Image (tube, rainbow, N blue to C red):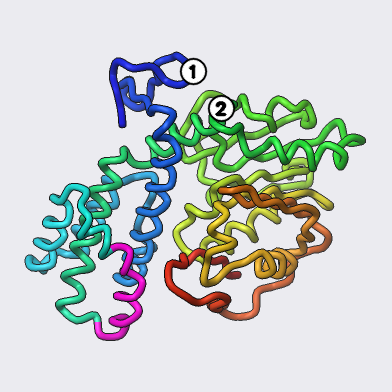
């Protein structure tokens, strides 16, 4: 997937991490992104089953490996299964087991028998190896940046410009916060609708601040809030449904009255999930005081624009995921408050 000699789709060599040139050929961009999504989702399912989810960090794979190994301290047999999984290159047998993971976990959720744990830890090792083979979060970000170029279909904020332009035409001092920003050259930055665009991401890029949104200090006053928050292809990478809900609730705290939230998700999160569809999303965001103004589905993505209409209601106890759709081949994406 990487070459030290070839050029990127812009004709320039891409410098990332430690000054090493790493590029991704255009025809592989989409495949890398989809593969990365698949592996992260499978790891999340496994880590939830093993009660490791809270301790994993998608931005630090070395730390994740150490966390998993620490959980296996004193259990040489399971550690061997994990190592066996890590030693395996891509193969059809392991991929088939990954596709059957949901059924395996569902059938054995209560027992966690020795045989099941052996399979699960082998699969976990295999997933970790595959993520490492892809290059981790760094490679995903390069692929995403390539995907935002005109020749690869353009960036997701183009539709935002079309929707938000008429709404902000009389507000020259408008400000925006872009969560998970990959470029300062996308449409939201060049459309001239905003006096200021604050760009944050888990990794530092040109004109993008390295910051975890969940650790960003809360606004002290209205001047530190934003007229728009853009959250494009970020929620689907948050570890679990509760953390996604916490992130959505936190976004509202950064919004000015009547402010807007732009959400982009992989289409499958909305059309092919056991726990989520467009109606469910509307109900959830309504709880946060957000009213949907626009939505659109492309072949691969789901776009939506919400406006803050009232203060969010207080959460009432714990909220469990509710199965909306059932059947084979569905994913487990969901958001709860």
Tell me where residue 292 sits by quadrant.
bottom right
Name the side, left or right, on which 201 lies relative to 2. right
Badge count: 2
Label ID, residue 149 = 2
Q: Quadrant of residue 4?
A: top left
User: In the rendered image, which quarter contains the C terminus?
Assistant: bottom right
* Rendered location of residue 295, percent (x, y): 73, 53
Task: Locate residue 109 relative to residue 258 in the image: left or right.
Answer: left
Residue range highlighted in magenta: 98-111
Sequence order check, earlier mark of 2 and 1: 1
Q: Secondary structure at mark 1?
A: loop
Residue 154 lies in the magenta-colored region: no
Q: Is residue 280 above or below residue 193?
A: below
- Tags 2 and 1 in contact by the CB under 8 Å rule? yes
In the image, what residue occupies the spot 74% across and 43% down? 228
Q: Which mark is residue 10?
A: 1
Depth check, front residue: 86 or 274: 274
Q: Residue furthest bottom?
A: 111
Q: Residue at x 20, y 73 (%)?
A: 117
**Residue at the location (79% across, 42% down)?**
163
Q: Is residue 320 above or below residue 245?
A: below
- Inspect this view and state whether residue 117 appears: yes
């Amino acid at each position: 997937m990487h070459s030290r000699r070839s050029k990127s789709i812009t004709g320039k060599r891409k410098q990332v991490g430690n000054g090493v040139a790493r590029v991704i050929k255009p025809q592989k961009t989409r495949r890398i992104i989809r593969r990365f999504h698949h592996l992260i989702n499978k790891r999340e399912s496994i880590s939830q089953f093993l009660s490791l989810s809270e301790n994993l960090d998608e931005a630090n794979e070395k730390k994740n490996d150490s966390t998993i190994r620490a959980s296996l301290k004193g259990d040489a047999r399971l550690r061997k299964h994990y190592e066996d999984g890590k030693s395996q290159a891509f193969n059809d047998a392991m991929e088939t087991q990954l596709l059957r993971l949901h059924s395996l976990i569902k059938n054995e959720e209560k027992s966690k028998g020795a045989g099941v744990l052996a399979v699960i830890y082998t699969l976990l090792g295999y997933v970790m190896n595959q993520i490492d083979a892809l290059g981790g979060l760094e490679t995903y970000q390069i692929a995403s940046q390539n995907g935002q170029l005109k020749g690869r279909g353009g960036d997701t904020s183009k539709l935002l410009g079309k929707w938000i332009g008429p709404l902000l035409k009389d507000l020259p001092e408008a400000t925006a916060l872009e969560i998970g920003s990959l470029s300062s050259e996308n449409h939201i930055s060049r459309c001239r609708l905003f006096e200021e665009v604050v760009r944050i991401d888990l990794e530092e890029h040109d004109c993008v601040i390295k910051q975890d949104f969940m650790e960003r200090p809360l606004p002290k006053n209205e001047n530190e809030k934003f007229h728009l928050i853009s959250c494009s292809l970020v929620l689907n990478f948050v570890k679990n449904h509760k953390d996604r809900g916490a992130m959505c609730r936190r976004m509202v705290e950064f919004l000015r009255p009547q402010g807007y939230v732009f959400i982009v998700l992989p289409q499958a999160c909305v059309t092919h999930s056991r726990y989520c569809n467009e109606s469910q999303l509307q109900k959830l965001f309504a709880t946060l005081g957000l009213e949907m103004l626009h939505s659109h589905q492309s072949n691969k993505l789901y776009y939506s624009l919400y406006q803050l209409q009232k203060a969010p209601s207080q959460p009432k106890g714990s909220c469990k995921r509710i199965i909306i759709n059932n059947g084979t081949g569905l994913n487990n994406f969901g958001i709860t408050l």
